[in-house]
Image (spheres, rainbow, N blue to C red):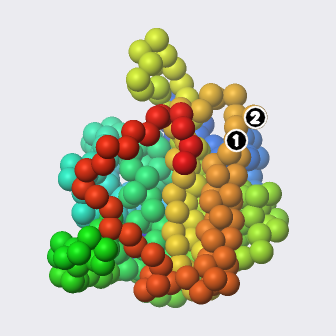
Amino acid sequence: LTGYNQGVISMGTSMGDEPIKLASTDPKTSIFNRAGYIPMNDLLALERSSNSYMFKIALLLNGTPYSYGMPLRLKDDTFSKMRNNYAQFGLGVKTGIDLPNEFSGVSGPSGPTMGGKTLDLAIGQYDTYTPLQLAQYISTVANGGYRIQPHVVKEVRDPSQDGKQLGQLVTEVGPTILNQIDNPKEEIDYVKQGLRRVYTGSHGTARAQFADAPYTAAGKTGTAEVVYYGPLREHYGINTINLTHVGFAPYENPEIAYAVVIPWVNTNLAPHYYQNNVIARRSLDKYFELKAKYQAEKVTDSNVKQPILPAITEEKIGENEQE
């Protein structure tokens, strides 16, 4: 969408997937293609998670189309072009959630000699984003380009008069549109086709987990190389992987958006590689299971029981006890 917005590609643009070799650097590749050349358009690039295609978009944004062994010196505005476009979706900026101390993520340094990092930024491996930012970003795509402020609070009421009935409604928190992205609807809908193919396409990176789903959904998988600096100091400096997954459902008329992040996975991916997809599928299954259950029981917001809970209780709940 950033490439469309900046006019460097258009819907259907073809650019082959191949190792990207810049001067004095090791090649940067897609996971599925370490050596060859695979014809690729934008929808297939989303379906297969083509790093190379996104690298080439970044190079076009810099005004320097790819050629083997090329030197790369960044123009002054390349980083800002990308980050400003990403921010429209909620990436790298605060989401506006009604909780204190929200973190906006971490932006790496930029400059004319940071060309390789621009390629990393094009695939989400340089700046860091929170799971909530990822959910806001995919929901912005899902709903046609509107970034919506997330809320924890649904409504505010006066204190109960009798300890049994809820107090009078004071404020009901409705949807707040923070901004609309610059891309037209047809470009957003086109990208959503690519995200649908991630789940259903013959090369879709989440096909194994979603192709047989009894509902329609769309999403994007992610694998980011990171260095461990978590709570266990003895592991500082070890190369690890963050597995991510974002999506929305139903595809035709989205109701929910979701983001999964599994940090610090062992670089031996074989036993773990699809767990981000498994978590997303199980979560979505449970959502639609509960939706069907509540519809069958005719449970709605207006008739669900909402007991008044005491502000203080003497009840003690053990950490290992189940209710």
Mark 2–mark 1 Cα distance, whole angstroms, equals 6 Å
Q: For mark 2, what is the residue? A: 270
Where 235 falls versus 227 (above or below)? above
Q: Nearer the viewer, residue 159 or 148?
A: 159
**x and y, in percent, of residue 69 in the image:** 55, 40
Residue sitting at 23 percent across and 83 percent down?
169
Say what secondary structure mark 1 lies in: loop
Q: Nearer the viewer, residue 279 or 221?
A: 279
Residue type, mark 2 in image? Ala
2 displayed left or right of 195 = left
Residue type, mark 1 in image? Tyr
Q: Quadrant of residue 38?
A: bottom right
Residue sitting at 40 percent across and 73 percent down?
306
Q: Nearer the viewer, residue 212 or 224?
A: 212
Please report contact status of discs 2 and 1: CB closer than 8 Å, yes or no: yes
Say what secondary structure mark 2 lies in: loop
Q: Nearer the viewer, residue 95 or 113?
A: 95
**x and y, in percent, of residue 94 in the image:** 26, 58
Task: Pick out the residue farthest to the top.
Answer: 234
**x and y, in percent, of residue 239 in the image:** 54, 25
Q: For mark 1, what is the residue? A: 273
**x and y, in percent, of residue 16 in the image:** 68, 59
Q: Is residue 178 visible?
A: no
194 displayed left or right of 181 = right
